Amino acid sequence: MTESNGAAPLDERDEQDQRDVGDRQGTAGEMPDWEKRFRAPRVSLPEWAQDAPDRSLFVSNATGTYELYAWDRASGEQRQATDRPNGTTDGTLSPDGAWIWWFDDKDGDEFGVWRRQPFAGGPDEVAVPGLEPSYPAGLALGRDGRTVVVGRSTDEDGTTIHLARLGSDEPPVEIYRHRESAGVGDLSHDGTLIAIEHTEHGDAMHSALRVLRPDGTAVAELDDTKGGAVELGLEVLGFAPVDGDTRLLIGHQRRGRWEPLVWDVATGEETDLALDLPGDVSAEWYPDGSGLLVAHSFEARSELFRYDLASGELTRIPTPPGTVSGATARPDGSVEYLWSSAAEPSAVRSTDGRVVLDPPGMKCPGSVPVEDVWVEGPGGRIHALVQRPAGATGPLPTGFDIHGGPTWHDSDSFAAGPAAWVDHGYAVVRVNYRGSTGYGRAWTDALKHRVGLIELEDIAAVREWAIASGLADPERLILTGGSWGGYLTLLGLGTQPEAWALGIAAVPVADYVTAYHDEMEALKAMDRTLLGGTPEEVPERFAASSPLTYVDQVKAPVYISAGVNDPRCPIRQIENYVKRLEARGAVHEVYRYDAGHGSLVVDERIKQVRLELDFAARHLPG
């Protein structure tokens, strides 16, 4: 690993990067729009230090690899903070803005240690000596500059949470341990309370909450998983940003969707906000603790509000139609947010009218807007998002691009991958199947025991609509997706072999039993929740949900890409599936790359999309 703590300013590096791009691919004018969308510099929503708001940290692909950048707002200086072959995106600032913390894994395997470097630049150091490498399970940094709470997950120990005092000779102290998954939620403003999420009850889809003192003793518990007809989840949204304030903002599902409430962990008092908004609602504190920045997600779009805690007044914050994928309230009362739509690339904006962070260099071309489709399915109305080439009429070759997660959802937001397929003449359909978030708890929680098969029933219903409506050519239908979407692709090719002309699966689950034994511990817990046990306890469910079970029924050509260091969809189980394709001479291609669950390198991502497009061009009828 090489460091770049004294790197040139962002604009100078960007110019050099564009020269490098020109050497490899020709000038930007000769570059197709789909490739420009990947290469154009983009940025994340900047995080700012709680006690030094002029110091910010963001992620950018300006050099061709996604890395962390420090931004001094007072001087305007931007500096690349990390520089690793496979990129870095997991980082945060200390509350005083003095340090950049970042997670150091090996080639995308997600197993490593936290490091830190001075905000102004300097050598990296192990942030918490005495802690062995692990998968991360949360991090909270105290405002005193010394207190650190680190969550760790390993196959051997399950989840452990440690408290460390930086600058002390004392080693980190373990304050929590359990075999089931858990994580650090937040540290109170004065450092006296630690909120954690845990699944000691064995349901990895629904967390309970516990608040600890620094010595590990419990202060308060909140558990909605017991005593009701259905299990309900809770999540930590953050302690009030005021010294001595014991209010904790949390999310709950008591009315069938995610909503915020304020829980005073000292008194036990719960203040239910009962916001009259459909869909899921989340929130975070304004810096002075007087109000909440509310994020509302409904039917694949989102909007922002301010909630005044004293008056209970809810005021809409104007944002364009589309998706707000992140937002933060600044000390001056303004709100910065990352926004995009399917047609318009992402931008970091402020409610004061400014574009907060606009990287120099090539500008990202737009794409076509998304159309909303609602289809009646076996479990209720299914929401699908459709894009088609401008002016095109069907029937068209159509890709069903299936999202991962599975607890996630596609939205009206900008995505370079689907836009590339549209540029090449394909319609793209994205389905928010049962298991997706954003449509209520029952829709998300429907994904149990018949895992994979439930989602494919919804996808089949939307496929029938796409054909009947004249959008899709039934002879040229592609099933594709990454991660859980890749899993559903392989499962669909085997269980619905007549329905699909082609399959393209990125980093998929292919052999569910082997995947379970090889994957990271937190995902083992999720699979036990989804399927009701281990492969040894419920072998019939694992078999019914495993693509390997149906591999001999696959008729369509199959393309698979896989990261050799992937801890989520490990390579061995993919190789087992590929061997079965090889044994029967099935048409297939496999691309293996040296990274984890996806790549943070722009050239690599472009290569993968180009290979997918080429595979479709060679094997799709007509």
Image: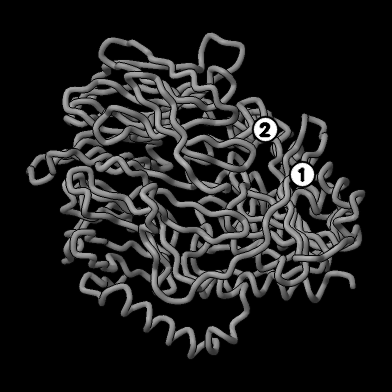
In the visual, does 193 lie left or right of 382?
Answer: left
Q: How far across and how far down the image is residue 141, in percent?
A: 22, 41
Q: Which residue is mark 2?
A: 447
Callout 1 environment at 10 Å: few (<14), some (14 to 19), or many (20+)? some
Q: Quadrant of the C terminus?
A: bottom right
Q: Answer left or right for 56 relative to 580.
A: left
Which residue is depicted at the point 75% across and 65% down?
390
What's the distance in space between the residues labelled 2 and 1, CA to CA?
22 Å
Residue type at mark 2: give it: Leu
**Residue 544 showing in the rendered view:** no
Rendered position, 267 above or below 518: above
| Residue shown at the point (19%, 64%) measured from the top left | 75
Q: Nearer the viewer, residue 292 or 110?
A: 292
Ranked by sequence position, the earlier of labels 2 and 1 is 1
Q: Quadrant of residue 584?
A: bottom right
Indicate the quadrant containing the N terminus: top left, top right, bottom left or bottom right: bottom left
Any part of residue 76 in sight: yes
Task: Kindly indicate whether the residue at mark 1 contacts the one at mark 2 (C-beta within 8 angstroms).
Answer: no
Q: Residue 552 sits in which quadrant?
A: bottom right
Residue placed most toward the observer, 188 or 465: 465
Give the residue pinned by disc 1: 373
Amino acid at dot 1: Val
Q: Which mark is residue 132?
A: none
194 and 510: which is toward the camera: 194
Q: Is residue 265 left or right of residue 198?
A: left
At x 37%, y 37%, the residue is: 157
What number of labels is visible?
2
